[in-house]
Image: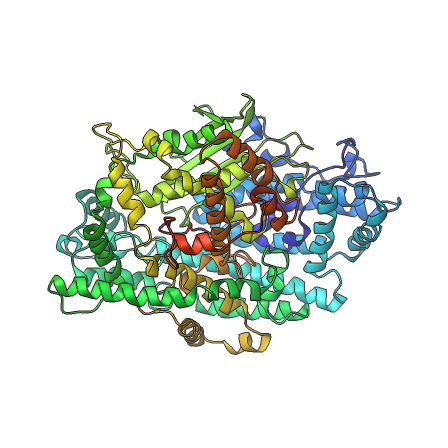
Amino acid sequence: MKAQILATVASAALLAGCSAAYGEDLDTIGQPDMAAADLPEATGYFAADSTLPFQTPDFSKISEDDYLPAFEQGMAIQKAEIQAIIDNPAPPTMSNTIVALEKSGRMLGRVARVFFAVTGSNTTDRLDEINTEISPKLTAHGDSITLNPELFARVKAVYDNRAAMAMTREDARLLEETYQGMVHAGALLTEAERERVKQINSELSEITTEFGQQARAAMADQPVIFDTRAELAGLTDSDIKAAADLAAEKGYAGKYAIALQNTTQQPLLPTMTNRAAREKLFKASYNRANGTTAIDTRPLVARIAELRAEKAALFGEADWASYAMWDRMAEKPATALGFMERMVPALANTQRREAAMLNEAIAAEGGDFEVQPWDWYRYANKVKAERYDLDEDAMAEYFQLDTVLEDGVFYAAEKLYGLTFQKRSDLPVYHPDVTTYTVFDRDGSELGLFYFDPFQRESKRGGAWMSNFVDQSDLWGTKPVIYNVLNIPKAPEGEVQLVSFDNVNTLFHEFGHALHGFFADQRYESLSGTAVARDFVEYPSQVNEMWATYPEVLSNYAKHYRTGETIPAEMIEKLEAASKFNQGYDFGEVVEAALLDMKWAALSQAEAAAIDTPEKVTAFERKSLEELGLEIDLVPPRYRTTYFNHIFSSPSGYSAGYYSYLWTEMLDRDSRKWFMDNGGLTRANGDHYRKTVLSTGGTMDYFEMFRNFAGREPDVTPMLEARGLIAGDEAADSEASDGKLPPRTVN
């Protein structure tokens, strides 16, 4: 297991990393000299692997009452397994210590993977209660492993002897990560310092869980209420009907309610013609969870920042960012900051230039106001439509959800990698909207199982993400069971499910993560598939977006839902021509969020302690954003502090890591150039990318991995060209993907 991750609640799903050394017996390694009867008895659904295909969870047999007992049993069993490692009289070896540790926690992993999947996608009040109760217990359990001095002594003994050992590359990587992970968790601290780390971890687990729940409540439970249909002028009849239905559901019969999305900007704003209504919707989003309603996450933020800074100081680090980035590709905060700051001057100029352009459009329409954030996309879309003659609503008529998935996403995977897919209806699912597919490899063998959960609902957190129900492991003989979760507004009953091009992009993005998981080819679960650094994990998913507009792929799936006509080439040409437009906002909000994250992560212990009131949280955010030199009043960050789930809803998560979306976009754009320079959508290119990147997991240095693929170091130039920040021909995407990152979960 990745030992350093055990200290976080969100990493509970990784408590079950399970492997043995090459060629050794599964039944004997892991609990050396310990009879099975010495382990606590496992009962209930999660006591054994599922009997369904691929060991996928049997949701028809799982009840909410199963989770707590299974968590408790799973922790007790793993505790006994760890004690057996410590008590082993034999000298520490790779097999009886490192692999045995990796092998522990099988039951705990089973329950955690299912529980955290369901609480993210289809939670209930009871599941939220269980989450609140179990999270600090899981954190304490993880700490009891990573901060156990007797266990660390055995790990260190193996590590110190590594030069004399014959190991595979994967063995060596597992040993390195186990040792360094425990050091990072606090194994070399004094006993008093370790105890304080445990206390901090426990409190962080509790309050970050609370932050996530409150942020979701501020989005899902507090829709924006409008009194009249006139206020919603410009929306489609189906949107207005949905608003009326939601209002009635929330106890506002006869009125209209619009549910907030997780980002600051809201998708309905561009089509709303009533400016006052736009302002109302935007400000409700912008001010959520900041005390303007009953929900205020600012006290939680203040405490999270204080605890993180204190924890970093215990390790001798200047700030949380320096502590948290130890295993990232970028490694140091200065590297990430320097990378982002290079973009700021051109981005600031772009924001001012585009704002002036929008003000001209407003004046031309007879408006007597200057553009504000709630106006921005309405007028940006108008200018885009006029300049590029692009009708995004008309374009959506060519994107029917099922067709995009099966004839677009799956088709590209078939052409690149030889994959085929078979829809199935025989497996229980956690919600009726979920569909499943068996995935077949290029030789016709079963590669894994894919779950697709596309629609928005109140029980689901915002954003889009991928994770595993079952991890790939050669050791255990398991193949990946992977799910993609999105938040597409569901069409009214009986209507065709169309999606925007942004959602098309998201489908390709999340399936890029799925491919990373499906092509995993590792012995150890903790190094398998998407178990890579935060600032590398988004790279394969972003690369997969390039196929959404690749002519051969596009012509296969982009069919008009009524006529069957293929999307006109000129419409896509317009889309690509328009793609660099509005980067001041599209790119700016992401850069601002990334820099805001780093500002929170760069606080010293004293600085964090001084932010001790809700008002000081707001003031710090404002000051931090003003220092960026960007037009923050016109272009607010994609997430404000009070609902920034990526960085505050788990003990670590994406904190000091939201820059990863930008860092991996650099790798992505450079890789797209490689694909196009080498012939585009070909099996040879797909097989090469699969071999050098997608199937490698976390088994090697990331720069080495990229060099193996591209034959050189990564270059930032294609990204800057794609975003229109420097001269170039490459098109840009409109936005980054969303969603917090739970264990082995990527967005």
Q: Residue furthest top?
A: 444
Q: Residue at x 56, y 45 (%)?
A: 744
Q: Nearer the viewer, residue 630 or 513?
A: 630
Give x and y (percent) for residue 434: 41, 34
Q: Residue at x 33, y 35 (%)?
A: 401
Residue 372 appears in the rendering:
no
Location of residue 503 with respect to 651 vertically, above or below: above
Q: Residue 205 sits in which quadrant?
A: bottom right
Q: Nearer the viewer, residue 1 or 203?
A: 1
Would you say 688 lies left or right of 370 here?
A: right
Give x and y (percent) for residue 81: 75, 43
Would you say 619 lies left or right of 182 here?
A: left
Q: Nearer the viewer, residue 300 or 19?
A: 19
Give x and y (percent) for residue 54: 57, 28
Give x and y (percent) for residue 735: 38, 52
Q: Residue furthest left?
A: 366
Q: Residue at x 71, y 68 (%)?
A: 193
Residue 140 appears in the rendering:
yes
Numbered circles on residues, count: 0
Q: How is the image coloured?
A: rainbow
Would you say 357 lies left or right of 198 here?
A: left
